[in-house]
Structures are given as structure tokens and as C-alpha cells.
Image (spheres, rainbow, N blue to C red):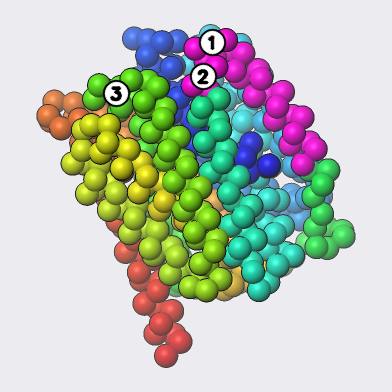
Amino acid sequence: MLEFFAEGPTSAFGVFQDYYVNEKFQGRVSNATISLIGVLNSSCMAILGVVSGKLCERFGYRIVPLCGVFMLSLGYFLASFASEPWHLLLTQGVLCGVGAALTFLPAAVIPSQWFERRRGLATGTVNLGIGVGGIAWTQFNHLLIKRISVAWVLRLTSIIVLALCTVSLLLIKTFQSTPVQQRPNLQSLRNRNLLTFMAASFFTGISSLVPFFYLPGYAKDIGISSSGGALITSIANVASLTGRLAATVFSDYCGPVVILLGAYVLTSSSILLIWTATHNFSGTMAFGIVFGLGYGAIFTQTSAFVAKFFGVDALPVFVGLYYTVSGFGYLFGPPIAGVLLEKTRSWGSPYIGLKLYCGVPMVIALIAIVAVKVNMRKSAA
């Protein structure tokens, strides 16, 4: 539930972006500017992961997320009264992002405290909330923005988040009954495999949000209706959910590195081989499905990877570190993609600059994961 409400709306931000650019602030702002709202949300959530982890260690896994839920709900509520883009940057962007950072970490960390043999299955199951959230929030936003206005959609979101996340937090129970300040071995930060994995996280952050932010607008630009664009985004989230399920099932048998390798192959090939070559509904749908499968698999394995190589005690700090690094990648993703979109419109192929900018960092991330796999094999030998 926490993953559903903290991260699910980020996957559906493309619906808001299309509305803000083409209706609410039409002619006043660019895609790059509006994308900063979603990017600030995701980046704050990710970059503050380490801070959230330390706060949870110090004050417990219930008090800190409760504060986060309040901030998340308040951010959506205040955003409903926004009349200028910078109002949304501060509310739906920063305030919601900080609230999400304090909210989502318990859901990412606590399952790994309770499970050892099926840790990948446990963490992957929890992470399904993001995929389900992306599906639900995309359709929720698309259907209701036209019927009751974006302001009331944001207010309803605020009420739902406050009520249901509070109930969810009351049900959370950590493996340790009291907060204990763990001291993970910081020498692990010098580990070559960890550094390479963090590099992959950074480049993944650059690419991962671009399709979800720009697919609705791209669909409209190539002649697909707004409903069709929302459908493609929803199907991409369904595929993400399927990818999470598949990764969850096979993680404990194949290992997180193998799953990650396959996921990066799917995402990078979907962008550079499918998306760059297609300009119609069926091709864009195919891209959404393949990209979603790989994207979903990537983000189910973080906690299992950290727990396997660095121990359960290191989970709050190192999982937070992973999200922090990816958060810096987010800052270089959709905003720069939006600038490239405007600069390369005359190149002939729709969105080609944006597509290449999305695909190349994912290939670099794939190379980094391959390097981790090769290093691990050498170490084992």
C-alpha cells in the first residue's frame, strides 16, 4: 500500500504533464519545465533515501513514515490550489517528494528483515505496489481530470493517501521490536562491484522516467487520441507489474544480478530498437510492453541485492544510497529530454533526440551490470 501511494503516482505523472502543458498552462511553459515537477518529486524521494533510512533507524519505522504521509497528503492538497507552475514545483514536486521519501522506505526494507530464503520473493511482492499504482493512478487521473477538474483530482488524492497510508502504517511491524542504530561497514563503499552497481543506478535514473513522462504527449503528437495515450501508459504499467512478478519468482533461483542483466537488455533494446523505429499505435504499444517488463524487473531487486552482498543490517543505509544515486540521475532525465525534444523537432523522426537520450544511458547501465557479473565470476573462481 505504501509503495502504491508513494511511488505509483510518479509513473502516472505523464497524464498531469500532458494536461499542464497543453491545457492549464498552454503556451506559457515547455515540456522541460513541467517535467521538473515530476522529476523533483522522484528526485527528492530518491535523494533523501539515506536520510530517511537514518531517521527510521533513530525514531522507528512508524513515526517517520507517518510524518511522510502527512507531508505527501499536504503536498497534493496545496497543489490543487496552484495557479502558477512554480506553485506546483514546490507542492506536487518538492513537498510530495519529501513526503514520499519518508513514506516508502519501510516498505522497501522491512520485508528483507523478515525473510532470508525467499527474500527476493518478499521484496518483489511488496514492490508490486508500484506497478499496480502506476496502472490505477494513470486511469484515475485521466478519467477524472476531464470530468471533475485537476484540482479535485489532487484533493481526492490527498484524502485517499492520508486515510489509507495511515491505516497501512498501523499494521507495520519490524523484526526488531525497538529501533536499533545499525553501523554497516562503510568500507563496503570502496567495493568495486558496489560502485559499478551505483553507476548503473545513476544512468538508469536518467532513462527510466522519460517514457512515463512523455508517452502521453508523444502519442498525441503522432495522431493517437489522449485516451489511447493513457491506455499505452497503463499497459506499460501492466507490463511493469508483470516484470516485477517474473523477477520476484525467478530472483531466488537465478540471483538478482542475472535478473538485472536480463531486465537491462529488455529496456535498452526496447528504446533503441522499437521506440526509435515506430510512429504508430501498435508499435508504441509494443515499446510500452517491452520497456515495462524490463523496468519492472529492475526495481524489484535492489533490497535483495544489498542484503545478499552487504548484509541485512546495511539495508536502510545502502538501499537509501541506491535511491539517492538514482535520484541524481532523475535530475538529468526528463528535463534535458524535454529540451532535446524542442531542439530536435526538425530532425524528421518524431522525438528522435529524446529517444536516443533515453536509450544511451540505459545501454551504459547494461554495460555496468555486465561488468558486475564478470567481476563476481572472477571473484568466485
Instruction: Give the answer, above or below, for where 205 lies relative to 44.
Output: below
On the rendered image, what quadrant is the N terminus found in?
top right
Q: Which residues are magenta?
A: 141-168
Q: Residue at x 35, y 69 (%)?
A: 370
Numbered tag placed on residue 147 in the rendering: 1
Q: Where is mark 2, residue-wise?
A: 143
Whether label 3 touches label 1, CB < 8 Å: no
Secondary structure found at label 1: helix
Q: Which sits earlier in the primary sequence, circle 3 or circle 1?
A: 1
User: Which of the 4 image quarters holds residue 124?
Assistant: bottom right
Inspect the image, locate mark 2, and give the three-letter code of the amino acid beneath it: Leu
Which residue appears farthest toward the front when viewing the image? 282
Q: Nearer the viewer, residue 159 or 332?
A: 159
What is the CA distance from the residue labelled 3 to the residue labelled 2? 17 Å
Marks 1,2: beta carbons within 8 A: yes
Element type where label 3 sits in the image: loop
